[in-house]
């Protein structure tokens, strides 16, 4: 896989995460998340792959602004983005989160293994 192809794939994945989370797309996340996936939520709690998928629920609109995508060798990558999330009950209220996501290439496809989120 060329660097250009890898970066394009990673950009597309990262831009898809917000809408997939808003739509509670458990099947898509089931493919994306590595078996050893861990998320550090903005409040500090850790979630496993199973906990993240089980906690998905249709909800707030999210918009992703990519800040960087970097390859680290041929099988590792990081992505950093800001995610704006609108409150369901109050569409005027927006929370912004700074996300750092770590991906590994497994059998020719990118899997998300670590997701660190904190308030921006």
Image (cartoon, rainbow, N blue to C red):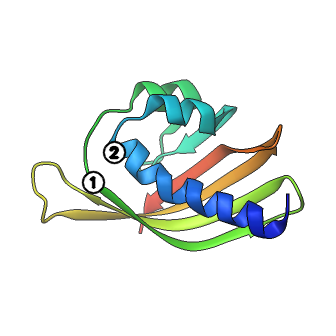
Disc 2, SS: helix
Q: Residue at x 42, y 52 (%)?
A: 18
User: Up-down: is 79 above or below 17?
Assistant: below
Residue 42: in sight, yes or no?
Answer: no
**Relative to the observer, which residue lies in front, 80 or 28?**
28
Q: Percent from the top left, x then y, of residue 76? A: 81, 55
Which residue has dot 2 on it? 22
User: Up-down: is 68 above or below 39?
Assistant: below
Which residue has dot 1 on it? 61
**Relative to the observer, which residue lies in front, 114 or 45?**
114
Q: Earlier in the sequence, mark 1 or mark 2?
A: 2
Labels 1 and 2 touching (C-beta < 8 A): yes
User: Up-down: is 114 above or below 29?
Assistant: below
Identify the image quadrant of residue 38.
top right
The CA span between labels 1 and 2 is 6 Å
Q: Residue at x 33, y 45 (%)?
A: 22
Q: Percent from the top left, x then y, of residue 14? A: 55, 57
């Amino acid at each position: 896989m060329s660097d250009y192809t890898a970066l394009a794939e990673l950009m597309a994945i990262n831009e898809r995460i917000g809408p997939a989370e808003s739509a509670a797309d458990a099947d898509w996340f089931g493919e994306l998340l590595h078996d050893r996936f861990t998320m550090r939520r903005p409040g500090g709690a850790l979630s496993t792959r199973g906990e993240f998928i089980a906690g998905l629920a249709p909800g707030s609109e999210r918009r992703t602004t990519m800040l960087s995508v970097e390859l680290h060798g041929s099988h590792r990558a990081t992505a950093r983005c800001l995610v704006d999330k609108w409150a369901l009950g109050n569409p005027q209220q927006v929370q912004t989160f700074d996300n750092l996501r770590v991906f590994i290439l497994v059998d020719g496809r990118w899997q998300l293994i670590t997701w660190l989120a904190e308030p921006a």
